[in-house]
Image (tube, rainbow, N blue to C red):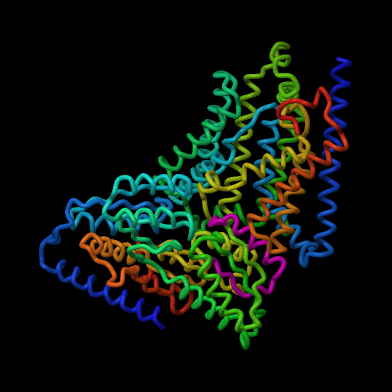
């Protein structure tokens, strides 16, 4: 209860600060009138070259240009060793805000703690470390995992006439989103004994591995009801395996993602059925706003982490399909 | 000559022992999985095993030919993804499939030529030359063609994608047909051509092959261009099936390890000179069976890698126990 109150307080604080910021922005000038010009922000994503991070960086740059602070993007290119080195180097450069995109819950935890202890405010985007910091902007993975699991129960559970068999394809077992979504989904499934998770194998975020796992599982369980892929990109492989097996009408393919136009195309092509989008474009804007606030000295009153949850958009195949839910770079 | 025959016979027996160990291990696994794993012993699962192994076998054909010549191609996976990228990007941009394929083939022939030139003319050791070219190729194609991106997603509605991932005949998928074609071409190259004979001679004793006047430089070009083309075939099949060209396969995946594992476990020694298509099939059968069985048993990817390593160790230990090392086999690079 105390945690809920604290979370609500943090969100209210963030909302108020954002409102103030937006009001300043409405003042009419092209450049916001604050004293944060010349400050330094470094962003270390897992990798550039994917719509998620490119979308964030685009919006963050807009904020940096508007307020006159610098934004350096240091691309780790999916190389975890390079990422820790880039973060270490960033800390030595003493930026005002360090933005990190955690590949796992533990990889950067020590460095986040070090940066915070040296007075660098750390903003974590979308994937949270087990080390708290100044702020977090991103999806509520617990909610996504729970909502998708509940939808699967509705479609495959008691009274549906389906087998109740589900295959889960996480990205990596130690990645924050996979850990939290699996925990939330299994909590739901445990209350519905008719749901049987027949496979729970990580794809290392690779479409080809997801395809091979799905093709094999479909042979073992031809009556499979649903697939829950933890990222729309690797779930493309799973969806293609379903389509190649001629089971696109029988197996529901669920995933989550940043919701760019590729996601809508996948739904249009019948490769995926339902995508819980956390709207990377909106997240980029939220992250930009949060950086502005942190540079202006925003902090939670009790010193805890400021948190902004990304609103969800559910891209669904069928009569409810709405292409406007997706954004384009 | 008589001495050479004796050495070959001794080596042949040794390789036969490893082949037998691997065949026995594969049959034991098949029997165990068939009894204990639900859904393993079905015709549908056999089709999945064949389809999932297609790209691995194609890559192993390329790597096998290279290793028989006492070479090594560490750029094979980079070539696979780069070739698939060239083809896929052209097709998605509206270029006709035959023209796109022609351009992709030309690009891969060029890559194979560069590798061969580095090894045969600049005389850089194959391992170093292909390690460097792997980095160069993946960097060049990622930045020049994909403009820094990691992924190219292919629409499943594209007729070329549908063709490459679809069925050629009822029950025979296109990837399986292309795998069979690659195996056939590898057999023809190794067994039915002068270049094939030279490849074995180069692997057996490179200096002797050169001194006797064999066209070792020209054949090196044949070897690395052939490997590049098998990589392209594997790339086309993989990208069409999964609907994505993914550069993380080069930088993060264990595919190169799997390819070398197939070749070596099948009985082609890293010191070259021996082996053939039969060995590639034997090695691929073990890895494909293990991978399929472990996926059916819901093993995590990390556990699968660990078990593959253990099987490799078990095969080496069993082989060494049955056939202890001697002066001929106790050389660097030999299994």
Residue in the image at 54% along x and 66% along y: A229
User: Residue extending furthest bottom?
Assistant: A159
Number of marks drawn: 0
User: Which percent across, then down, holds residue A117?
Assistant: 34, 56
**Residue nearest the observer in this picture, B292 or B191:** B292
Tell me if B8 is positioned left or right of B228 in this view: right
Tell me if B126 is positioned left or right of B40 in this view: left
Depicted A317 relative to depicted B307: above or below: below
Depicted A242 relative to depicted B281: above or below: below
Residue in the image at 29% along x and 55% along y: A119
Residue in the image at 51% along x and 45% along y: B87
Depicted A187 relative to depicted B269: above or below: below
Residue A211 on the magenta span: yes
Depicted B308 relative to depicted B331: above or below: below
**Residue nearest the observer in this picture, A126 or A2:** A2
> In the image, which residues are magenta?
A204-229
User: Which percent across, then down, holds residue B232?
Assistant: 58, 41
């Amino acid at each position: 209860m105390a945690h809920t109150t604290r979370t609500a307080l943090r969100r209210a604080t963030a909302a108020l600060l954002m409102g103030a910021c937006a009001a300043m922005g409405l003042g009419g000038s092209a450049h916001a009138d604050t004293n944060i010009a010349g400050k330094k922000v470094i962003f270390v994503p897992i990798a550039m070259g994917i719509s998620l991070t490119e979308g964030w960086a685009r919006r963050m740059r807009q904020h940096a240009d508007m307020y006159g602070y610098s934004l350096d993007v240091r691309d780790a290119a999916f190389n975890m060793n390079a990422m820790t080195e880039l973060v270490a180097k960033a800390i030595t450069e003493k930026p005002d805000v360090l933005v990190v995109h955690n590949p796992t819950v533990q990889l950067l935890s020590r460095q986040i703690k070090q940066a915070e202890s040296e007075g660098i405010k750390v903003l974590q985007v979308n994937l949270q470390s087990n080390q708290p910091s100044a702020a977090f902007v991103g999806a509520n993975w617990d909610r996504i995992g729970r909502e998708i699991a509940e939808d699967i129960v509705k479609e495959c559970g008691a009274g549906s006439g389906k087998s109740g068999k589900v295959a889960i394809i996480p990205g990596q077992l130690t990645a924050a989103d996979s850990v939290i979504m699996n925990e939330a989904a299994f909590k739901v499934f445990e209350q519905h004994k008719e749901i049987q998770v027949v496979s729970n194998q990580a794809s290392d975020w690779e479409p080809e591995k997801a395809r091979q796992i799905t093709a094999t599982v479909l042979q073992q369980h031809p009556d499979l009801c649903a697939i829950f892929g933890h990222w729309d990109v690797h779930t493309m492989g799973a969806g293609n395996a379903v389509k190649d097996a001629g089971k696109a009408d029988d197996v529901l393919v669920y995933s989550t993602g940043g919701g760019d136009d590729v996601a809508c195309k996948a739904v249009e092509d019948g490769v995926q059925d339902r995508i819980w989008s956390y709207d990377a474009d909106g997240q980029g804007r939220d992250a930009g706003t949060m950086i502005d606030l942190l540079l202006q000295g925003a902090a939670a009153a009790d010193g805890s982490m400021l948190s902004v949850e990304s609103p969800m958009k559910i891209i669904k195949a069928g009569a409810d399909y709405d292409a406007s839910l997706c954004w384009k770079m | 000559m008589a001495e050479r025959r004796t050495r070959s016979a001794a080596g042949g027996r040794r390789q036969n022992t490893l082949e037998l160990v691997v065949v026995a291990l594969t049959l034991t696994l098949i029997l165990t999985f068939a009894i204990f794993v639900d859904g393993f012993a079905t015709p549908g699962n056999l089709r999945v095993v064949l389809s999932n192994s297609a790209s691995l076998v194609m890559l192993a054909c390329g790597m096998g030919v290279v290793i028989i010549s006492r070479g090594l191609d560490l750029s094979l996976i980079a070539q696979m993804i780069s070739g698939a990228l060239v083809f896929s990007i052209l097709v998605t941009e509206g270029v006709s499939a035959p023209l796109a394929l022609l351009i992709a083939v030309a690009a891969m022939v060029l890559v194979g030529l560069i590798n061969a030139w580095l090894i045969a003319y600049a005389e850089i050791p194959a391992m170093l030359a292909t390690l460097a070219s792997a980095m160069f190729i993946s960097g060049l194609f990622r930045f020049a063609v994909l403009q820094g991106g990691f992924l190219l997603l292919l629409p499943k509605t594209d007729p070329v994608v549908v063709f490459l991932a679809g069925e050629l005949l009822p029950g025979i998928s296109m990837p399986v047909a292309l795998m069979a074609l690659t195996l056939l071409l590898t057999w023809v190259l190794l067994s039915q051509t002068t270049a094939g004979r030279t490849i074995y001679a180069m692997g057996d004793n490179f200096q002797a092959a050169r001194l006797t006047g064999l066209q070792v430089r020209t054949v090196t070009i044949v070897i690395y261009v052939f490997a590049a083309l098998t990589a392209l075939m594997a790339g086309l099949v993989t990208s069409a099936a999964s609907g994505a060209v993914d550069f993380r396969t080069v930088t993060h995946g264990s595919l190169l390890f799997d390819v070398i594992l197939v070749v070596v476990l099948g009985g082609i020694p890293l010191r070259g000179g021996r082996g053939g298509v039969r060995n590639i099939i034997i090695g691929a059968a073990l890895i494909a069976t293990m991978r399929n069985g472990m996926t059916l048993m819901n093993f995590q990817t990390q556990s699968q890698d660990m078990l593959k390593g253990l099987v490799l160790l078990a095969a080496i230990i069993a082989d060494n126990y049955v056939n202890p090392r001697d002066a001929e086999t106790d050389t660097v690079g030999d299994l």
